[in-house]
Amino acid sequence: MVENAEKFFDLYRRDEALRERVAEAEAAYPGSLEVRESVAEYVLLPIAESVGLPFTIKDLRAYETRLKMRNVKPDEEIPEGDPIDEDPVSYWLLDRGWENDPKYFKK
């Protein structure tokens, strides 16, 4: 179902309402590295299923790994019209950008 992950993120990039829906659900989580898989499992996957594009954490990891391997180096030229040129890639599991900051952790 890696194809569904790809289709979902294509839709996600084009559909502002879907991005807002995901962002609203994601806001309930503190944003630390230790919960990123849970956020994907309890926020992203149910929303993907609700729009008819179900996939698993394993599928998401495979999709993101494929994207990460495809990313070009900064000094390489990106072909015009390439999807990577249009929007920066946002990863849910790999390099999500969340911090491993203790202030976000429960004690």
Image: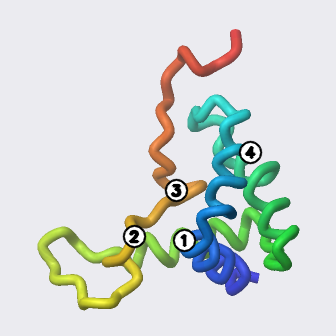
As measured in the structure, the alpha-carbon distance from the residue carrying label 2 to the one carrying label 1 is 8 Å
Element type at mark 3: loop
As measured in the structure, the alpha-carbon distance from the residue carrying label 3 to the one carrying label 2 is 17 Å
As measured in the structure, the alpha-carbon distance from the residue carrying label 3 to the one carrying label 4 is 20 Å
According to the picture, the residue beneath numbered tag 1 turns out to be 13
Q: Position of residue 84 (x, y in %)?
A: 37, 77
Q: Position of residue 5 (x, y in %)?
A: 68, 76
Specify whether 74 is left or right of 22: left
Q: Quadrant of residue 24?
A: top right
Residue 40's mark?
none
Residue 94's mark?
3
Element type at mark 1: helix
From the viewer's perspective, is the residue at label 3 or at label 1 nearer? Answer: 1
Residue for point 35% across, 75% down: 71
Query: Of label 3 and label 4, which has the lower sequence position?
Result: 4
Query: Of label 3 and label 1, which has the lower sequence position?
Result: 1
Residue for point 38% across, 65% down: 88
According to the picture, the residue beneath numbered tag 4 turns out to be 25
Residue 39 lies, with reference to residue 10, above or below; the image says above
According to the picture, the residue beneath numbered tag 2 turns out to be 87
As measured in the structure, the alpha-carbon distance from the residue carrying label 1 to the one carrying label 4 is 17 Å
Q: Callout 3 environment at 10 Å: few (<14), some (14 to 19), or many (20+)? A: some
Q: Quadrant of residue 20?
A: bottom right
